[in-house]
Amino acid sequence: MTLFPYPKLIASSVDPSKISLTVKGLILGLVPVIIFLAKVKGFDLPESSVTEFAETVGNVIESVTAALSGAMVIVGVLRKILVSVGLYKPH
């Protein structure tokens, strides 16, 4: 669970700590386009490979935002501690 939700545009309406199904669907919807462009350029990509790649991109986005969220929490807690003991003065 992330403490900071995704931006409203990409956040799930059911669980703001996850990417919306709409965004995941858009990413997966790019699969046929990627396959078509690859074939035009002479590559032969199986659809399953591109689908797995699209799902991996979604998972990476979730992981990165979760890590950023955790870092923000840690920095916030450390700053709060430093301010409370007088070692840091906000601007």
Image (cartoon, rainbow, N blue to C red):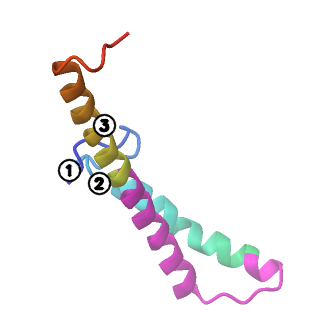
Look at 21% across and 16% down and name the residue there. 86
Secondary structure under badge 2?
A: loop
Decide which of 75, 49 is in the foreground and name it. Answer: 75
60 to the left or right of 19: right
Tag count: 3
Q: Toward which corner of the image does residue 78 lie, by quadrant?
A: top left
Quote the CA–CA distance across marks 3 and 1.
28 Å
Provide the residue span drawn in magenta: 38-65
Instruction: Identify whether 86 is placed above or below 14.
Output: above
Q: Toward which corner of the image does residue 76 lie, by quadrant?
A: top left
Earlier-in-chain disc, 3 versus 1: 1
Residue 76 badge: none
Look at 39% across and 55% down and name the residue there. 22
Which residue, given by chain and number where applicable, does mark 1 sit on? 14
Which residue, given by chain and number where applicable, does mark 3 sit on? 75
Which residue, given by chain and number where applicable, does mark 2 sit on? 18
Percent position of residue 37, x then y: 75, 73
Q: Are marks 3 and 2 in contact (CB under 8 Å)?
A: no
The residue mark sitting in front, 1 or 2, is 2
